[in-house]
Amino acid sequence: MFTEPTRAQRITGWILTGLVGLFLLFDSAIKIFAVESAMEGSESLGWTIEQMPAVGWILLVCLVLYLIPRTALVGAILLTGYLGGAIATHLRVDSPLLSHTLFPIYVAVVIWAGLMLRSSAARRVLSAGTSAAQERSGRVREGTRVS
């Protein structure tokens, strides 16, 4: 069921959004401006230096969409896809599981937690799917409609 976020939830959501936003802004900037230490790490993952500015711009566009309240849900979905690519990259080169390969999942959890705490629209959209699923499962189990 959809509930409007409280003031404390909104503040917490924006704090989480700000923290993850700063991290991703820094990450995109070092890719766009081809910072040498970042390029060395990217090369070890199989990326070329020439590819990194494009990757940085893609991340920055996704981040901007996430930070704008009207497009935050789309931005969170796109960032989740971006982070999925990071997981695949780390799996491909056999990076350590907890510290490298799963790190994008930790970031995604903060992205979605921040969004769900701050956005009533995201809560409404995502709870609508949950309500429909509960309604369908209730009809199957009980043969009646769940209200």
Image (cartoon, grey):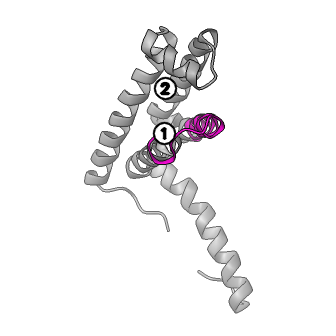
> Which percent across, then down, holds residue 141?
70, 88
Res 135 quadrant in image: bottom right
Sort mark 1 into few (<14), some (14-19) or many (20+) by Cα contacts within 10 Å: some
Question: Where 95 falls versus 58 (above or below)?
Answer: below
Q: Left or right: where does residue 15 sit relative to residue 90?
A: left
Q: Is residue 85 magenta?
A: yes
Residue depicted at 63% across the width and 14% down the height: 48
Relative depth, front residue between 8 and 47: 47
Disc 1 target residue: 100
Q: Secondary structure at mark 2?
A: helix
Tag 1 and tag 2, C-beta contact below 8 Å: no
The range drawn in magenta is 77-100
Q: Left or right: where does residue 145 sit relative to residue 55?
A: right
Relative depth, front residue between 132 and 88: 88
Q: Which quarter of the image is occupied by the C terminus?
A: bottom right
Disc 2 target residue: 64
- Report the mark closest to the observer, 1 or 2: 1
